[in-house]
Image (cartoon, rainbow, N blue to C red):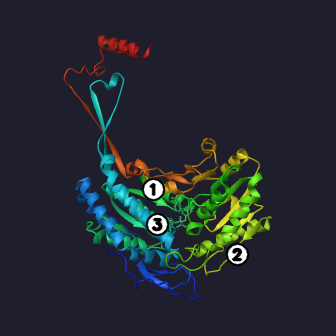
Amino acid sequence: MGTVATTKEPSLASSDLTGAATSDGGTLLVRAPRTGEVLGEVPDLDATQVAELVARARAAQPAWAGLAVDARAEVLDRYRRLLWRRRGEVLRYLQAESGKPYEDALRELGLLLDWAHHWSRVAGPLLADEPLRTRGLMAVGRRSVRTFEPHGVVGVIGPWSFPVMLSIGDALPALMAGNTVVCKPSEVTPLATAMAAELFVAAGGPADVLLVATGGGRTGEALIDHVDAVHFTGSVATGRAVAARAGQRLIPCALELGGKDPMIVLADADLERAARGAVNYGLANGGQICMAVERVYVEREVYERFVDLVVQQVRSLRVGPSGGPGTVDVTGMIHPPQVDIVDAHVRDAVERGARALTGGRRGPVAAGYEPTVLVDVDHSMRCMREETFGPVIPIMAVRDADEAVGRANDSEYGLTASVWTDDPARGKAVARQLEAGTVTVNDAMMHSALPELPMGGWKTSGLGGRGGAEAMRWACRQRIVQVLRTTGHPDLGWLPYRPRSSRTLERLFGLLYGR
Ligand code: NAP
């Protein structure tokens, strides 16, 4: 891939330093979040270098798009198999630069493999010309078809929470559509993305079809200035800036942004399972998931029992540094400054009368936060209204489902939500009242592991662009081709206008639409 130089293989050795990526002139040092150990360095690309990278991707694009879809799928299949064979290296990079538990890294890689498998198989049918049915007077003799064409070069800008899935993963439908792609990973976690892109070439992918532009926010801005479409995953604040910049160029812009995802527990739910669900979906990946359970509303009659169950389970979790399979449940935060936000939310809640039944403070690992269960919370508190993006589960008692729905919808976000009940019909009825792009009954988040399903937020959570046929369609320009069979066609209404043809036209309109 040629844009990334790592100083050495990442290791998990510890020291007392904490830190993330730091810029050193034209180079970014990538550090282990917990220890501050330098894991590698990558170029901090400026606007000129980004323009050059996009020019390379642009030069490679016609040949890539010129391959049959099956040939592109064959490249993707080889890539998937190589990612699996070299999983040890990818996982090592992922764990080292994010400090995730082994299982969270493995699941991320598994998702990437599944998406590669999916997009290589569905691209053919999704990209095939689509005949469009038309009706009415003007449709007579006309046949219309929709064709799908790549944009050219697509930019994919991703966050630090899922370094390979939300950069390379989102590149896959765009690649299958015949685009070339330049990914801009977070400056905090560029190594796993760069390594995964190198494997694309090692698997036989043509040069310059999948490139990585390393650097910070400026690099992302420059990418938007040169690509033909941009797929962005990150915070609402950056999403607004990305949309504004893309708007200046009028290029398509997909936005997958933050969430404050509510979980509603109704009194008839399997409480034991719902409590495990809250802990799993609240604390997996250290709560650093846009679709993590960020707040829980429980019907009052089962509230005490539910809280007890959650607290018991959270207390049994193992918190520590990232290690081998099955050794730890929650590690430190991926981006150390995020710990300050988590701590500010917890302190604000406690100052306003909330109680932390577990955790409530930094540690026990450096750059980490103890898994925290908050009760006596209300909507005056930041932890109920702003995205915390950390290992915090605030639980609030509500009178009934109606109050839960009102509270859940009292948010600027609308990414996902979940309803837990023994009655699927009631669950569905409540789901339909929630202002969110996806609502799950008796589960959460797992819809995002199914690439067949479209995914997108309501309100400030974004404008969609991931999953389902929509993702492939987003990666394409659409062209309508209409063909008229001329033999015997009256060309009604053409110039010059004549009384007789106008009267015929009028009669036909009357026959068709006047009754
Ligand atoms: P972020 O600060 O918004 O950054 C996201 C990406 O944008 C990074 O690569 C960042 O680069 C880059 N960037 C920063 N400023 C930019 C600019 N002006 N123009 C173009 N690119 C720019 O988000 P984050 O802190 O990495 O990630 C956490 C957020 O992502 C949370 O809000 C979370 O909910 C959201 N998220 C959403 C989804 C979803 O699917 N909806 C999934 C995961 C995460 P640097 O990091 O190098 O500054």
* Residue 504 drawn above or below residue 415: above
Residue type at the position of mark 3: Glu
Residues at circles 3 and 1 in contact by the CB criterion of under 8 Å:
no
Say whether residue 137 is visible: yes
- Res 154 visible: no
**Which amino acid lies under the numbered mark 2 shown in the image of this protein?**
Arg
Q: Secondary structure at mark 3?
A: helix
* Residue that appears at 49% across and 61% down: 233
Judge: label 3 CB < 8 Å from ligand 1.
no
Name the residue beneath numbered marker 1.
246
**Residue matched to label 3:** 108
Label 3 crowding class (10 Å Cα cut-off): few <14, some 14-19, many 20+? many
- For the residue labelled by badge 2, is the local secondary structure a helix, a strand or a loop? loop
In this rendering, the answer to whether 299 lies above or below 17 is: above
- Horizontal relation, residue 470 to residue 291: left or right: left
Q: Looking at the image, is mark 2 or mark 3 earlier in the sequence?
A: 3
Residue beneath disc 2: 361
Q: Secondary structure at mark 1?
A: helix
Residue 418 against residue 278 in the figure, above or below? above
